[in-house]
Image: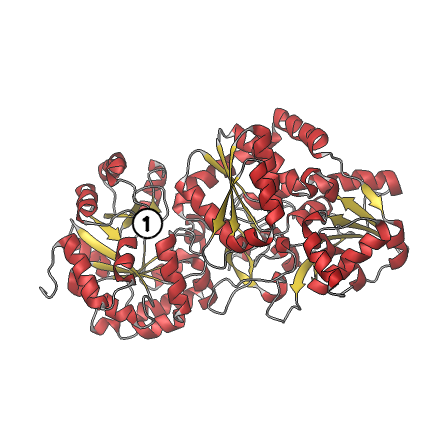
């Protein structure tokens, strides 16, 4: 079983996944951020691979990507940073990003390297189902990487069933049809989450986009196995002088784990 | 890896997934899927309706002013010792070929029940063409434009505003066309039900490249008929067009794609020189990759980050090309040449002084390619004069005053 599978095997509720852009705020922040997230109570980490044209992201995450690229982040640098991560990071780690940099790196080589350093899965919002099924899915499976698809309130039931069959790990339920960082009221999406819940999907469901504090996290957790926080976390560490302290303070506001409690 | 599952019936049309050979597809986040899927399943059916065709053709004739003339440029022909016909898209309403596509897409958007239109623009020609049809139909219009382009294309920004469009600056990334496109796509993600995105070129996720090519194909449809009338044959020996994203080239090539005897020549912007680091010659500098929803040639770093191109012509200043063109390049069906900023300027003045026609800087790149071809008196050359040069007067004046010409 994969690390992600094990996580959902023992924890079915209030799973907290946190997104952070690799190489942000400093080029060498990546491991420090991941350690702080694990120590602060995150159950899973989504590490963003910065891209020049991140279509599905809002301004805050795009700005963090731009900063990371200016800092000198590349996939080669990232894998170098991650090569010993499993000595200190024990929770599941997914890489999230866009397909183009991976195609340039070489898709198979990328999967091989990701697996070798201990990455558990991938989220690539602009990799479509057709290309996944015909070309990339088999490579991901060969290297034992989970692959997570997104669903939105506009995704038909039939299509949700389809991506549930294809996804491994969990399903990423976008909480509103919006780019990241839009503060729409999560309550408005209640019907949609209930609909997902009633479908009794094969995969656990994590709610993403729009989660920013304890209230929105609690609301998301009422109908899903947990939630993903991205933009709010990037904001929290953007100007922080001490990333570790800022991370713990941020997480304690969400899941109530005090800094240093672990 | 993708090649083996593709069969191309005619080069004209992509397969059901939107692939021309290994280029195309719809690499979009799930949030865009309903919008794009609605278009994909309905665009052909709507475009083939008799009532749609009637309205589209009537507007092209009475509003745009089509057919645009096919003009035998006598003095230009004499200079190159051949017969050069200019397809006068510069004489269209709003001054370029862009309106052929926006007229088509606004009618499509109406039939899809959309109440809000968004568009991206670089030089502002597509923005003006979109704002124009929105005014015509009384539909809300938002145009995304890079902050840098807003500053350097003031007359077109004023035209869009006068037409009632809201011009929104794209302030992310390099603040030019590529970023305006990103912002327009984000707007579409955040407005999934009432909004139609009018893409201005043969780029973007399937079905855009095919849809825009079909709307622009009126150019080559007319060329064939006009050429038959003037020469007795529908087929020229050479067809020349400039390529940024490639919409005027797609329209000019379209009805000649299956006629192997017709040499198709695409001219990219070499900027200050292909290898100067300030260029937009995508086929020479790019590698296969994914940009704005389709797989094509993309100018990018080794790490797969999209790089900022350069061309004196804002309309060619784009780091990709449409997937159809990537396929034409890869298969050898079209010849890709390039012209530098200086060569384009020189060609613009040459046409102006020989024929009394001031061309757009984009079209001047196509004109500059005449110098690179071995033409003779037996050849029949058709060149798409995609737009007029009014918008480029500041650049032309600067070149004149600088003693460049």
Question: How is the rendered protein coloured?
Answer: secondary structure
Q: Quadrant of the N terminus of chain A?
A: bottom left
Q: Secondary structure at mark 1?
A: loop
Q: Tell which of A29 and B399 is nearer to you.
A: B399
Query: In this view, which residue lies farthest toward the front?
Result: B401
Residue farthest toward the top in the current orientation of the protein: B51
Q: Which residue position holds label 1?
A: A181
Relative height, residue B353 to residue A79 (above, below)? above
Could you tell whether A69 is left or right of B45 in the image?
left
Q: Residue at x 66, y 67 (%)?
A: B272
Q: Position of residue A140 (x, y in %)?
A: 36, 60
A249 horizontally vs A175: left or right: left
Q: Quadrant of residue B348?
A: bottom right
Q: Residues within 10 Å of mark 1 (few under 14, many from 20)?
A: some
Q: Quadrant of residue A21?
A: bottom left
Direction from residue A165 to residue A41 in the image, left or right: left
Horizontal and vertical percent position of residue A63: 38, 59
Res B175 visible: yes
Depth check: B84 or A155 in front?
B84
Residue A233 lies left or right of residue B110; in this view the side is left
Q: Position of residue B339 (x, y in %)?
A: 71, 62
Count of marks overlaid on the render: 1
| Residue in view at x 86 percent, y 38 percent | B229
Residue at 36 percent of width and 41 percent of height: A177
Chain under disc 1: A
Q: Quadrant of the C terminus of chain A?
A: bottom left
Work out whether residue B294 can be spotted: no
Return the residue nearer the eye: B382 or A229: A229
**Image position of B207 with respect to A78: above or below:** above
Q: Residue B191 at x, y = what percent? A: 41, 39
């Amino acid at each position: 079983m994969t690390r992600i599978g094990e996580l959902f095997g023992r924890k079915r509720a209030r799973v907290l996944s946190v997104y952070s852009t690799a190489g942000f705020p400093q080029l060498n922040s990546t491991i420090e951020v991941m350690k702080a997230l694990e120590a602060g109570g995150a159950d899973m980490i989504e590490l963003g691979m910065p891209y020049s044209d991140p279509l599905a992201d809002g301004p805050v995450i795009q700005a963090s990507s731009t900063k990371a690229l200016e800092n000198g982040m590349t996939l080669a640098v990232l894998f170098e940073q991650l090569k010993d991560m499993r000595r200190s990071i024990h929770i599941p780690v997914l890489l999230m990003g866009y397909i183009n940099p991976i195609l340039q790196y070489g898709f198979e080589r990328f999967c091989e390297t990701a697996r070798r350093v201990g990455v558990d899965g991938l989220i690539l919002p602009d990799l479509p189902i057709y290309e996944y099924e015909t070309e990339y899915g088999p490579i991901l499976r060969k290297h034992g990487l989970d692959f997570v698809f997104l669903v939105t309130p506009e995704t038909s039931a039939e299509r949700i069933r389809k991506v549930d069959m294809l996804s491994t790990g969990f399903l990423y339920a976008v909480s509103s049809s919006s780019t990241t960082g839009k503060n729409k009221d999560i309550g408005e999406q209640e019907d949609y989450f209930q609909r997902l819940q009633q479908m009794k999907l094969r995969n656990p469901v994590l709610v993403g986009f729009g989660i920013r504090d304890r209230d929105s996290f609690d609301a998301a957790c009422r109908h899903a196995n947990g939630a993903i926080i991205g933009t709010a976390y990037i904001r929290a560490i953007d100007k922080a002088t001490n990333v570790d302290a800022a991370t713990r303070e941020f997480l304690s506001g969400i899941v109530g784990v005090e800094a240093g409690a672990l | 890896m993708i090649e083996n599952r593709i069969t191309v019936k005619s080069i004209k049309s992509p397969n059901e997934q939107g692939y021309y050979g290994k280029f195309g597809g719809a690499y979009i986040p799930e949030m865009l899927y309903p919008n794009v899927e609605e278009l994909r399943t309905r665009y052909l059916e709507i475009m083939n309706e008799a009532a749609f065709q009637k309205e589209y053709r009537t507007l092209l004739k009475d509003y745009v002013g089509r057919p645009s003339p096919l003009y035998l440029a006598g003095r230009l022909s004499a200079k190159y010792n051949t017969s050069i016909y200019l397809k006068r898209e510069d004489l269209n309403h709003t001054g370029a070929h862009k309106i052929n596509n926006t007229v088509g897409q606004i009618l499509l958007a109406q039939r899809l029940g959309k109440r809000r239109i968004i568009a991206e623009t670089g030089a502002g020609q597509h923005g003006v063409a979109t704002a124009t049809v929105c005014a015509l139909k009384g539909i809300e219009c938002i145009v995304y434009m890079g902050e840098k382009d807003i500053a350097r294309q003031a007359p077109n920004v004023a035209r869009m505003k006068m037409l009632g469009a809201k011009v929104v600056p794209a302030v992310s990334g390099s603040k030019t066309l590529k970023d305006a496109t990103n912002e327009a796509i984000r707007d579409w993600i955040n407005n999934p039900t009432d909004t139609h995105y009018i893409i201005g070129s043969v780029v973007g996720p399937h079905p855009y490249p095919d849809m825009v090519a079909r709307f622009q194909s009126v150019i080559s449809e007319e060329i064939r008929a006009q050429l038959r009338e003037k020469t007795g044959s529908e087929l020229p020996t050479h067809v020349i067009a400039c390529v940024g994203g490639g919409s005027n080239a797609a329209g000019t090539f379209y009805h000649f794609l299956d006629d192997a005897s017709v040499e198709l020549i695409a001219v990219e912007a070499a900027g200050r020189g292909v290898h100067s680091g300030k260029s937009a010659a995508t086929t020479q500098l790019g590698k296969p990759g994914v940009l704005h929803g389709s797989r094509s040639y993309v100018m990018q770093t080794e790490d797969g980050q999209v790089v900022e191109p350069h061309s004196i012509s804002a309309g060619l200043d784009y780091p990709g090309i449409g997937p159809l063109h990537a396929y034409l390049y890869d298969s050898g069906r079209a010849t890709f040449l390039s012209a530098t900023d200086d060569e384009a300027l020189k060609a613009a003045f040459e046409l102006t002084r020989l024929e009394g026609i001031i061309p757009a800087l984009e079209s001047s790149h196509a004109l500059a390619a005449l110098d690179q071809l071995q033409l003779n008196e037996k050849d029949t050359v058709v060149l798409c004069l995609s737009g007029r040069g009014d918008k480029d007067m500041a650049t032309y004046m600067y070149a004149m005053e600088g003693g460049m010409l």
